[in-house]
Amino acid sequence: MLASDLIRIVLFINSYLGKDKNWVKARYSYLCSTPVSIIDPETYADHRLIGEFGAVRDLPTPTEMKVYFGFDKKRRNFMCPRCVFGGVYGYDDREPKTAMLEPNKHDPDAVWCFVCGEIQPVERVLCTSAECKGNVISFEWGRCLNCGAETP
Ligand SMILES: [Zn+2]
Ligand SMILES: [Zn+2]
C-alpha cells in the first residue's frame, strides 16, 4: 500500500467516524494527550503536527485537501509565519507551505494556515530576494512567505 493510500483512508475514516471531523484538530488533541507532551504539551504537539503535515501535504489530491482541510493546493501556497518562524523553524529543516491567502476574503491582506488555524496579517510588497517573485510578506516577522527572506 502506498503512503498516500494510507493517508487517504485515515482522512476518509476520520471524516465519518472521528469525534473531530477535522483531522488536524483530532491529531492535535491526540498529540497533547501523549506522555511525551506532558513536559511541554503545546510546543511538542505543535512541532509534531507541523512536521507531520509538512510530510503529508503533498500526498492527498487537491480535491481531498479541500474536502478534508479546506485548503486549496491549486492556489498559491505560503509558509505560515506562526508555524515556520514562530520558534518551530528549522525543527526538521522543512518549510511546509501550509498557508494561503485568507479564503473567506474577510481580510485579503492575511494568510490562513490549515495546520494551526491562525490568520496572520501580511503586506503585499515585493520580496527583496532577486530569485524570488514573492509579494506576500509577514507583517509581524518582516519575512517573505514564499522564500523566507527578510524583507524589511
Ligand atoms: Zn500555521
Ligand atoms: Zn521571497
Image: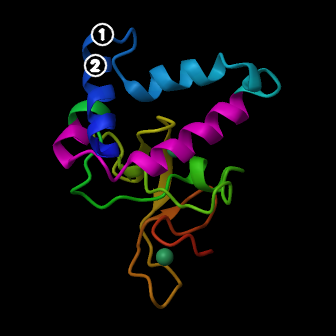
Range drawn in magenta: 42-66
Type of amino acid at the residue the image marks with label 2: Ile
Residue 34 percent location from the top left of the image: 67, 19
- Which residue carries the number 1 mark? 17
Q: Residue furthest bottom?
A: 130
Q: Residue furthest right?
A: 39
Secondary element under disc 1, as helix, strand or loop, is: helix
Q: Which mark is residue 42?
A: none
For residue 69, above or below residue 32: below
In the visual, does 93 lie left or right of 74?
right
**Residue shown at 39% from the left, 26% from the top:** 23
Query: Dot 1, crowdedness within 10 Å: few (<14), some or many (≥20)?
Result: few
For residue 134, above or below residue 17: below
For residue 132, above or below residue 59: below
**Residue shown at 41% from the left, 39% from the top:** 114
Dots 2, 1 in contact, CB < 8 A: yes
| Residue 46 part of the magenta-drawn span | yes
Q: Alpha-carbon distance for marks 2 and 1?
A: 6 Å
Most foreground residue, 109 or 63: 63
